[in-house]
Amino acid sequence: MVRRNLSPSTRSVYLCLACLSVALHVILAFFCLTVLQTACVLPNPSSSSLNPRTETERHHRVPSPSHKLSISSQNDKPYKSNATGMPAAIDPEKKTIGAGKVNRVIEEASKLRALFEHPLYNLPEVGLLEDDWLLRVKKNEDAGDEEDINSDSQESASHEKGYDKVSWTNDAESHPPWLRFHLGITRWALYNRKDVTVSNLTHYLATQRILGAVQKSGGTQLKLLMSFPNYGQALLKPKKQSRDAETDVNLFYFSDFERHNAEISAFHLDRLLGFNRIPPVVGRLINVTSEIREITTDRKLFRTFFTSPAGNVCFYGQCEYYCSTEHPLCGQPHSLEVSLAAMLPDLSLAPRRSWRSPWRRSYSRTKLAQWEKDPAYCDTVKQTPPYNHGTRLVDVIDMAILDFLMGNMDRHHYETFEKFGNETFLLHLDNGRAFGRHSQDELSILAPLQQCCRIRRSTLLRLRLLSDPYFRLSDVMRQSLAQDPLEAVAPLLSEAHLAALDRRLATVLHVVETCEEQHTDVIFNDLGKYEVYEQQIK
Ligand SMILES: Nc1ncnc2c1ncn2[C@@H]1O[C@H](COP(=O)(O)OP(=O)(O)OP(=O)(O)O)[C@@H](O)[C@H]1O
Ligand SMILES: [Mn+2]
């Protein structure tokens, strides 16, 4: 061993360096333990259907908003429950992501929660009368003390091959999620956002074994009707093009492909706007061989299956548009992204009425519709039943705002439940042609708002809330979509589409401002009955 004679000054320099090195290691170890360990795993929003949050999330508080729209005593409390509840997109056991992204995810999760905790999203339900429910559980008089339910599937033979044994009673606890969804439909909304039924339903659609797959008639593009063991059903729309493909500028809106991610995103957007008028939709990766080809009883569909030159299993079905070998729907080699929309109650139980939209496009390459030629068009509409009474006109305007935000030009018709007559909400079905372009805003979709200069007060206040950076539509939308299982494959909406939402929202608010400068009766006050809450919702 070589002994070195070190001078005292060199020795003290070495000593200092050693101390410094130890100190740095201690700091590093402390940092790793406290920051990285807690921050590198995403909270799992679905370890149960009620989505309890992780400690990291639970203790994260949203800074007190400075904006007057956000006055809510609830914002000062730690968050107790996740108001959103959808199936997990990412398995926390497997997926780790950078601390920066985690912070953003947590911050946006808080925004979404704060939004749904805002009084504007929690207006107390006005007393619903018996006639305000679409369906009712009916006692079976003939069955003595036993109670039975009146549902569309109840009468089906419970011993049918592959179906669960039916043991539903009058007790809601015994009902499958799809039935709870049907029984929760009211005159004013399809579902109650705060009810766990929606998250149970989407979880169930995303995970249940698929028992049947047949083509659904109606409409122009291919759709499948999927059946599940507990008699639930869903409307399937397949992924037809890459998510980021922008609609060809030379393609008319009526020739555009439908998009599965548009159906999913539309459901989330409608919920964020507080409408609750789109049936729950969820994404799923399905196996086209085992979950369609091998189980379908639809011979016409079966015959269209083939193996592509690349070895992928494809099919095209039978329909008016794009059902041909030139437009195959292909698995990779079996796996295909789809959207699954919860089916509404059967038409025999709950008939619907289809209404032609007054602002329907001409669906012609050459002709313009009347509303495109006549700036005073709304004066006529306002005098025409059912738009001359109740909420129908502002409902159409709500729908136009939703459509403008997502660039949907294909709203030729809308539907209502016949039972509720004219005093009811509008179903926003068929959103497959939304989110086609992010680089262009189609102002003509806003014609109902621009021409009538009328808007529901609750809608306007929610739009203003969503334009506040404290909430920001694109942020809450990103977070809402993060709950969908397909987000694990790729974001359902690209950042460009999310940014377009904020830009279009600003346009909607600007149109309202211009209206207010020129008219006095722009605001339709639907919040009159909530006067006691005025302080909070203003
Ligand atoms: N969730 C649902 N539950 C029950 N019926 C539905 C649901 N969604 C859509 N439908 C019905 O199926 C019909 C066809 O669906 P959709 O409009 O999505 O198809 P489409 O091919 O896009 O139609 P189009 O080509 O006319 O735009 C609708 O008119 C509606 O009545
Ligand atoms: Mn369509």
Image (tube, rainbow, N blue to C red):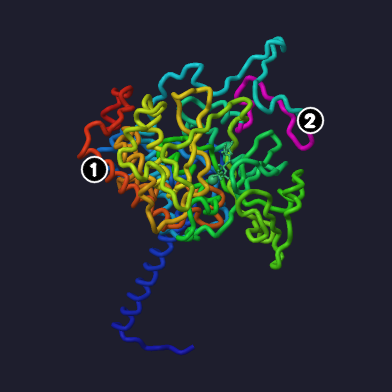
Q: Main secondary structure of the magenta part?
A: loop
427, 311: nearer the viewer:
427
In the rendered image, the vertical position of residue 172 relative to residue 62, given as above or below = above
Q: Which residue is mark 1?
A: 514
Which quarter of the rendered picture does the C terminus lie within? top left
Q: Position of residue 150 (x, y in %)?
A: 65, 21
- Residue at the spot x=56%, y=57% of the render? 489
Q: Which residue is mark 2?
A: 159
- Between marks 1 and 2, how big is the CA–CA gap? 62 Å
Q: Position of residue 275 (x, y in %)?
A: 43, 35
In the rendered image, the vertical position of residue 23 relative to residue 148, given as above or below = below
Q: Is residue 320 left or right of residue 10?
A: right
347, 485: nearer the viewer:
347
- Residue at the spot x=56%, y=31% of the render? 181
Q: What range is drawn magenta here?
A: 160-178
Q: Nearer the viewer, mark 1 or mark 2?
A: 1
Under mark 2, the amino acid is His
Under mark 1, the amino acid is Thr
Can residue 58 be seen here? The reply is: yes
Mark 2 surroundings: few (<14), some (14-19) or many (≥20) residues within 10 A: few
Mark 1 surroundings: few (<14), some (14-19) or many (≥20) residues within 10 A: few
For marks 1 and 2 on the same chain, the one whose residue lies earlier in the sequence: 2
Marks 1,2: beta carbons within 8 A: no
Q: Label for residue 468? A: none
Res. 532 image quadrant: top left
In the rendered image, the vertical position of residue 172 relative to residue 464, given as above or below = above
Ligand 2 positioned in quadrant = top right
Can residue 79 be seen here? The reply is: no
- Residue at the spot x=47%, y=17% of the render? 129
Q: Position of residue 189 (x, y in %)?
A: 47, 30
In reply to whether residue 129 is colored magenta, the answer given is no
Name the secondary structure under disc 1: helix
